[in-house]
Amino acid sequence: MPAYLVVHPRGQKRDDALIEGDDLTLDIQGSWAVLSDRNGICLAIPSEQGASIQRIDQQETTEE
């Protein structure tokens, strides 16, 4: 399951967010970063906010 960590600059005093879900995608639309899933847009962040977005992939464990 894909997940994205959204980290805002410290001076903005905004909470960081972990967005996760099935079929989650990140698209750049103009100056916006848009996270969406099969139900629609989950979060849209304008580039002016200066937030960084990092994809977090869970490690899959396999048993032998």
Image (tube, grey):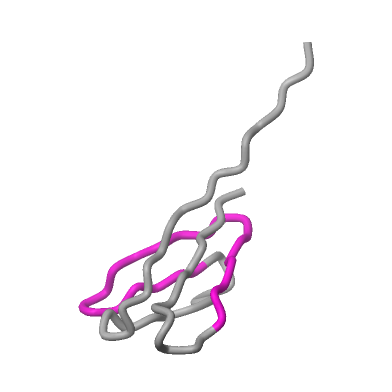
Q: Residue at x 43, y 80 (%)?
A: 10
State the image coordinates of residue 45 (x, y, percent, origin top left): 38, 81
- Kindly report the secondary structure that dominates the magenta region of the rendered protein: strand
Name of the residue lying farthest toward the top: 64
- Residue 29 highlighted magenta (yes or no): yes
Q: What is the magenta range?
A: 15-36
In depth, the one of 57 and 50 nearer the eye is: 50
Task: From the viewer's side, name the closer residue of 2 and 41.
Answer: 2
Quick one: 55 or 9, which is closer to the camera?
9
Side of 22 where 26 appears, left or right: left
In which quadrant is the C terminus drawn? top right
Q: Position of residue 32 (x, y in %)?
A: 30, 78
User: Does residue 26 show up magenta in the picture?
Assistant: yes
Asked which quadrant contains residue 35, the reply is bottom left
Q: How far across and how far down the image is residue 30, in percent?
A: 21, 77
Q: In terms of image quadrants, where is residue 53?
A: bottom left
